[in-house]
Image (cartoon, rainbow, N blue to C red):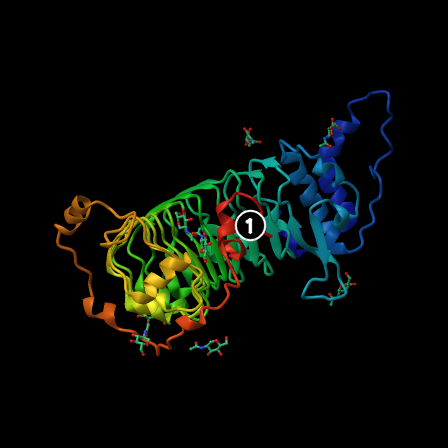
Amino acid sequence: MEGILFHTKSITHIFFLLLPFLLPVLSQNPLIPLPPLPLVPEILTFLDQRLSIIYPIIQTFKTTITLDPFNITATWVGSDVCSYKGFYCDHPPDNLTAVALASIDFNGFRLSAPTLDGFIDQLPDLAVFHANSNNFSGTISPSIAKLPYLYELDLSNNNFFGPFPTAVLGMTGLSFLDIRFNMFTGAVPPAVFFQTLNVLFLNNNNFIQNLPVNLGASPLLYLTLANNKFTGPIPRSIANASSTLTEVLLLNNMLTGCLPYELGFLRELRLFDAGNNFLTGPLPCSLGCLKKIEILNLTGNLLYGQIPEVLCALGSLVNLSLSHNYFTQVGPFCRKLIKSGVLDVSGNCIGGLPGQRSRHECALFFSHPRFCPYMASYNFIPCSIHNSSSNHSSPTRSKENMVTYKTLTRHRLL
Ligand SMILES: *[C@@H]1O[C@H](CO)[C@@H](O)[C@H](O)[C@H]1NC(C)=O
Ligand SMILES: *[C@@H]1O[C@H](CO)[C@@H](O)[C@H](O)[C@H]1NC(C)=O
Ligand SMILES: *[C@@H]1O[C@H](CO)[C@@H](O)[C@H](O)[C@H]1NC(C)=O
Ligand SMILES: *[C@@H]1O[C@H](CO)[C@@H](O)[C@H](O)[C@H]1NC(C)=O
Ligand SMILES: *[C@@H]1O[C@H](CO)[C@@H](O)[C@H](O)[C@H]1NC(C)=O
Ligand SMILES: *[C@@H]1O[C@H](CO)[C@@H](O)[C@H](O)[C@H]1NC(C)=O
Ligand SMILES: *[C@@H]1O[C@H](CO)[C@@H](O)[C@H](O)[C@H]1NC(C)=O
Ligand SMILES: *[C@@H]1O[C@H](CO)[C@@H](O)[C@H](O)[C@H]1NC(C)=O
């Protein structure tokens, strides 16, 4: 198959390749006389030679599809590959007069096939592959790394299992990787974060490992690791992505340790949700530097101490969920946010506020000595603070407008 990619093949050669598929059909009915050799069935004329090369690859893939509830593949006939349902053509970057298969969008088609190997990795001009909500399985071939233009790969909500698909590590141009809602297990190779990814959606799998220490090495805007079994602390290196990182979902994992002071460097951050983990320690005052933060959700952790006034003074906050922790103090700025419904501190240990934990529960928690490394860093504010709380901007965004919260449902995003 490899050779098909790189060598010019005549159309008759393509049909020669197809003969094994055609012959059984043709020989089924003995009443139909076989045409004289050479056997040339319907002559297919392709708009571009590139399409004639991928035609047999699509037809072979079609034979591997075991379920097609919407009869999508019924449209995958004839030479007009660009009109097949789910297939989109465009001029390839290397020849603007040619026509090639540029993208595939199978979102929601619910096709079942045991593998995509021999299919997407054999489509040399493919730039985008979206296959949300299908029933694809198997491994991803390392030859996918040879596709020069592929930058967007969405295999979300399929039936993939086993280790992380390391084949994607070879893809130098990949910027969007969405493998959420599969059954991948084991570790995410740290090398993923050395790729130039803008979007990485790994939520709702079964990954089990400490968060890689090079987490911030990729220029990520959107990162979702939610609903896995990630352990260990949030790495300080997350700040390496400070010029890009916009939304981060870490909720429902098993993260431990104290929040790194470096979180405060994430100047583009609008959403950070690490709810329902085992994070502990006080909130670093550096969080008061998150000038663009709209939703900060740390509910259901083991955080304690005072809620920093500089955090509550941030004018961009729409929701600050700190419920079900062990916070003990709130100042006037934070009380203002409680009144306005922005700050939720229910289920903590704050004297005088309603809906707090019992005295006994709080005493039990604080009977264990608790430490964080770099304790001095928790009081340090690495930015200039303007008293902006009088300026509480009318919230421009809410939960519904956040990109990554949509990843927590199975369906398509794009
Ligand atoms: C698909 O095709 C089969 C047989 O041709 C037909 O019975 C069925 O209704 C079709 N399904 C859809 C969703 O069009
Ligand atoms: C570009 O594509 C067109 C159409 O397929 C083809 O005729 C032409 O030879 C190609 N040019 C080059 C430089 O490959
Ligand atoms: C998914 O494909 C497998 C075979 O690979 C099949 O057993 C299963 O029924 C399919 N599931 C759905 C929901 O189509
Ligand atoms: C990334 O973060 C680590 C740990 O904070 C730091 O040592 C390193 O210099 C950072 N690299 C870049 C490129 O910022
Ligand atoms: C805001 O200004 C007041 C008075 O100038 C000061 O006491 C307070 O600490 C400031 N708040 C923050 C969050 O910087
Ligand atoms: C915070 O997280 C909890 C648990 O995931 C969720 O129930 C709550 O709605 C979240 N709060 C906001 C403001 O998103
Ligand atoms: C988020 O905050 C708004 C007020 O700014 C409040 O109406 C809404 O209920 C909050 N959402 C959640 C999920 O707590
Ligand atoms: C208040 O908002 C205005 C307009 O959005 C902005 O120019 C100004 O700098 C803000 N003031 C503070 C103290 O942040």
Question: Going by the image, does 368 lie left or right of 233?
Answer: left
Say whether residue 177 is visible. Answer: yes
| Residue closest to the eye, 347 or 106 | 347
Position in image of residue 166 (x %, y %): 45, 50
Say whether residue 179 is visible. Answer: no
Residue at x 83% of width, y 49% of height: 45
Please determine whether, in this image, residue 389 is positioned above or below residue 327: below
Position in image of residue 402 (x %, y %): 51, 57
Question: Going by the image, does 342 lie left or right of 1?
Answer: left
| Residue closest to the eye, 210 or 299 | 299
Residue 50 found in image quarter? bottom right
Task: Identify the element where label 1 is drawn.
Answer: strand
- How many dots with numbers? 1
Identify the amino acid type marked 1. Asp
Disc 1 marks which residue?
A: 154
> Badge 1: how crowded within 10 Å, few (<14), some, or many (20+)?
many
Q: Which quarter of the rendered image does ligand 5 occupy?
A: bottom left
Residue 73 found in image quarter? top right
Position in image of residue 110 (x %, y %): 61, 37
Position in image of residue 43 (x %, y %): 84, 43
Residue at x 40% of width, y 71% of height: 389
